[in-house]
Image (tube, coloured by chain):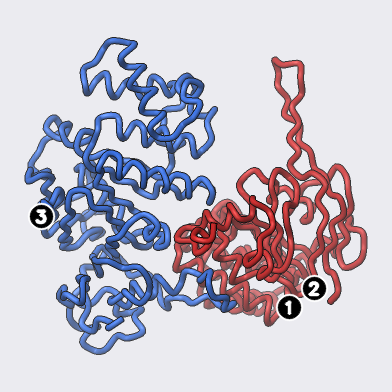
Chain colours: A blue, B red
Amino acid sequence: MRNIIEIKDLCVNYKISSNEKIYALKNINLNIKKGETVAVVGESGCGKSTLAVSMIKLLPENAEIFGSIKIDNEEILDKNNQQLLDIRGKKIGMIFQEPGASLNPVFSIKEQIEETIKIREKISNKDVLKNIGLNLLKEVGIKDEKRVYESYPHQLSGGLQQRVMIAIALSLSPEILVADEPTTSLDVTVQAQIIELLKKLKIKRNLTTILITHDLHLALELCERIVVIYAGEIVEDGFIRSAKDAHHPYTKALFEIIPDIKKKIKKFKVIKGEFPDMKENFKNCSFSGRCEFSKAKCRRYQPEVVRVGKNYVKCFYPLKG
Amino acid sequence: MIKILQVNNLKKYFSIEKIFSEKEKIVKAVDGVSFSIKKGQIAAIVGESGSGKTTLARCIAGIEIPDEGEIFFEGKLLDFSTKEKRRKIQYIFQDTYGSLNPRIKTGDILAEPIRYHFNLSGEKLKEKVKEFLKKVGLNENFIKNYPHELSGGQRQRIVIARALTMEPKLLIADEPVSNLDVSVQAQILQLFLELNLKDKITILIITHDLRIVYNLADYVIVMKDGKIIESGKTDTIFLNPKSDYTKNLLCSIPNSPYKNQK
């Protein structure tokens, strides 16, 4: 399979004052094959959302971006806003965390879905537009699509709003769908439904899906390949199903802090220490301060990415599993 | 074990007034709920949003006045007429930022209730504040910080410390970790476990995260549309759920082991 996304040595910094920068992403290398389902997992502030918006070059003005992002062999970072229109929406569809905030409260769902198609696909026939819109709503599993189509965002539940957002993201038939914390503000049962929907759409449209989440179990639910980010670096990338497959100590720790539902222990494991300051550019292993296996070498030097089994791990002493 | 809390047939209805429509719409937020919690237990209320779990908790804490029903606390009918009674039930809210006054330093946030309830002042007051900071795992330097200078997890610890200054018998926590990162969640939950174990505080936690419930709670109450669907010991509910609603909740847990059993 060919790579649909090729990210090489990507660095993103945010300037926050004349002499301070936040190093949000450091030397990210990531290839994603067409049709793959990948989860990007990490704590808040680790740079996972920055990675998502970098793919469509939708970064704020204070951001500096280096390296290369190729979508279908086309370099994204060289493109201007006009050229990016071919990527945004058409190649990569995006769903954001808060559906309520992403939809415009003063326009009906009909107007918001049709606007995208009208402008981007240059269709002006009202019946055709309506037909496309209603079919999209049906596709994302909305049963009373006619009512929803005429509704305003506040009249819909969070789950329905998120389905509408997915419909809009799919309206230009993208090949890649990036979902940035799509279920965080939703109920557990609704969350399960949305994940089920993403699974169905992935197969039906042969979508390459990238799920950005802090919830490792949610990632396992949808994705085979897990990319773990810590402090702006990819620390592990590979096929992980449980704590046993984790080769980086951080991935293992992430598994352990989420309460187990198979075995009751009445104890919550914690990762000691605090998330590092992203204003520094690390010269050592970013996780060394919190790692239970860290040795002197980890605190002094930056580890290289090594291959362990099927995974790529950025660690001097990867776990055997 | 002694019951610390007993709720009998509790009801709380809200009416939504529509200016231009004749009919008044009534939301039955809590609709005839009865249950009890034993002393020293950790109990959890679970359910989807809109199931009435927060309203129920707010009634117990005296923030809402129930329309019908009785609440017995330590065997006595609950009324919030005296500050002594108010003191024993403390409430922790989901939004840590909204719970703390942004203009007051954390030291003063903790000192105020202590001064009011225990009549302490001067050095003794300071000592007491530091004691409570230590209890929630923060060092004494934090008294000089404003809430916005703290991380979400640290703010939640301050909120918990403030609740503890009242030496409560029952601590109600409404989604205490849902705004926090996974790694911070574990720290706060561990703190709850320790408070329950060492200080013997009864805890009533409201959450939609069943993974947390399984490892934290002794007793689970499942709510839907203002009614209790099912309640019982955690192991019983998780291993042998009776209602379809509970089964559905269990299957909705991401990467749930229950899914295969369906």
Q: Which mark is residue A67?
A: 3
In the displayed structure, A170 sits above or below B256; it is: above
Residue B25, position in %: x, y? 74, 27
Q: Amino acid at mark 3?
A: Gly
Residue B251, position in %: x, y? 53, 56
Q: Give the camera-side residue of B200 and A218.
A: A218
Image quarter (top left, top right, bottom left or bottom right) of the C terminus of chain B:
bottom right
Picture quadrant of residue A168? top left
Q: Is residue A130 left or right of residue B103?
A: left
Q: Which residue is mark 2?
A: B39
Q: Are marks 1 and 2 in contact (CB under 8 Å)?
A: yes
Q: Work out which residue is located at the far right of the displayed protein and give it.
A: B76
Q: Amino acid at mark 1?
A: Lys
Q: CA distance from mark 3 to mark 2?
A: 60 Å
Residue B199, position in %: x, y? 71, 79
Image quarter (top left, top right, bottom left or bottom right) of the N terminus of chain B:
bottom right
Q: Which residue is mark 1?
A: B200
Question: Quick check: do tags 3 and 2 share a chain?
Answer: no
In the displayed structure, A114 sits above or below B244; it is: above
Tag 1 subunit: B
